[in-house]
Image (tube, rainbow, N blue to C red):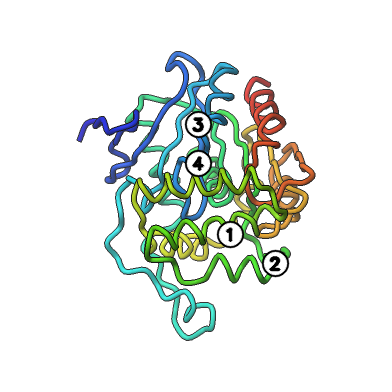
Amino acid sequence: MSIMQLDAGEQLAPANGLSLCYQSFGSPSDPALLLVMGLGAQMVLWEDGFCRMLADRGFFVVRFDNRDIGKSSRISTPPPDLARVFMGQEQLRAPYTLADMAADTVGLMDALGLEKAHVVGASMGGMIAQEMAIRHPERVQTLTSIMSTTGERGLPPPKPEVWAAMTAPPPLTVEAFIEANVRVARLLRGYADAAEEANDRARSARAAARGLNPAGGARQMAAILASGSRAEALAGVKIPTLVIHGADDPLVPVEGGRATARAIAHAKLLVLEKMGHTLPRAVWPPIVEAIAAHARG
């Protein structure tokens, strides 16, 4: 299968036996910078303005929908009943792992002719980026792991109210999806902000228009749970690494970022105040500058 053009500048590319939807910003002659998004989140959560800020700093920026989300391939295997899994009533059966999702990302690079890329992942995307650094180090020029973790046991858990919201039954209508996403984003951000809530609503409406796949989020969660700890493998990573985390992250507490920075030799850690588990526009400038400086360094 060849690359296929979609609407709004989006394209479909073959990757690891699947089709991944992607979009690029900037010049293909510039160094490639790959943005990997998190659990149940479409590529548009890397907002256009954020992508353009990186492109303006001299990078060919590529964002994409992971498998099982947005316009990328959906997996047909029924998702596990995570409530029963968490209660010990059912054994976890994951149709794929984070390593498979890392292979998807490398497959997208192959389709785009990218030998290497600066890889930036947020939340689950940070876990996928870590797996790329572990399993495909020759393809990763630098690694930036944002609001993510190593997966090791003993780290502080999410706040109960945030975890309850994240694991609630998925909304089944567009209206319910938008309202649920606005509520969850407020919890993840950790504070009320009228401007950001308007952005949350607009992002959710855009995601809904691109297609909803509640079962995909459950399969992605199963992939996280089935993949276990990366701490030991990360100790062997030699790729220049930057870890960025919010001081007030209620879903992946900052200790997860500190653990990631400890696991990788010579990793740099940037902890940002008034940042939870979202990317509000107020933190774009320091994050973009940190990524750009890290990639150039």
Q: Is residue 165 above or below residue 20?
A: below
Q: Earlier in the sequence, mark 3 or mark 4?
A: 4
**Which of the two discs, 2 and 3, sits closer to the camera?**
3
**In this picture, residue 18 sits left or right of residue 234:** left
- Label 1 Cα crowd, 10 Å radius (few <14 / some 14-19 / many 20+): some
Q: Secondary structure at mark 2?
A: loop
Q: Residue furthest left?
A: 1
Q: Earlier in the sequence, mark 4 or mark 1?
A: 4
Q: Amino acid at mark 1?
A: Val
**Which of the two discs, 4 and 1, sits closer to the camera?**
1
Q: Earlier in the sequence, mark 1 or mark 3?
A: 3
Q: CA distance from mark 1 to mark 2?
A: 12 Å
Q: Secondary structure at mark 1?
A: helix
**Which of the two discs, 2 and 4, sits closer to the camera?**
2
Residue topped by disc 4: 36
Q: For this rendering, which residue is in front, 189 or 80? A: 189
- Label 2 Cα crowd, 10 Å radius (few <14 / some 14-19 / many 20+): some
Q: Is residue 243 above or below residue 79?
A: above
Q: Secondary structure at mark 3?
A: helix
The tag on residue 184 is 1
Q: Earlier in the sequence, mark 1 or mark 2?
A: 2
Asked if the residue at tag 4 contacts the one at tag 2, i.e. Cβ–Cβ closer than 8 Å, the answer is: no
Q: Amino acid at mark 4?
A: Val
Residue 255 percent coordinates (x, y): 75, 55
Q: CA distance from mark 3 to mark 4?
A: 14 Å
**In this picture, residue 182 sits left or right of residue 249:** left
The tag on residue 26 is none
Q: Amino acid at mark 2?
A: Lys
Q: Residue at x 67, y 66 (%)?
A: 153
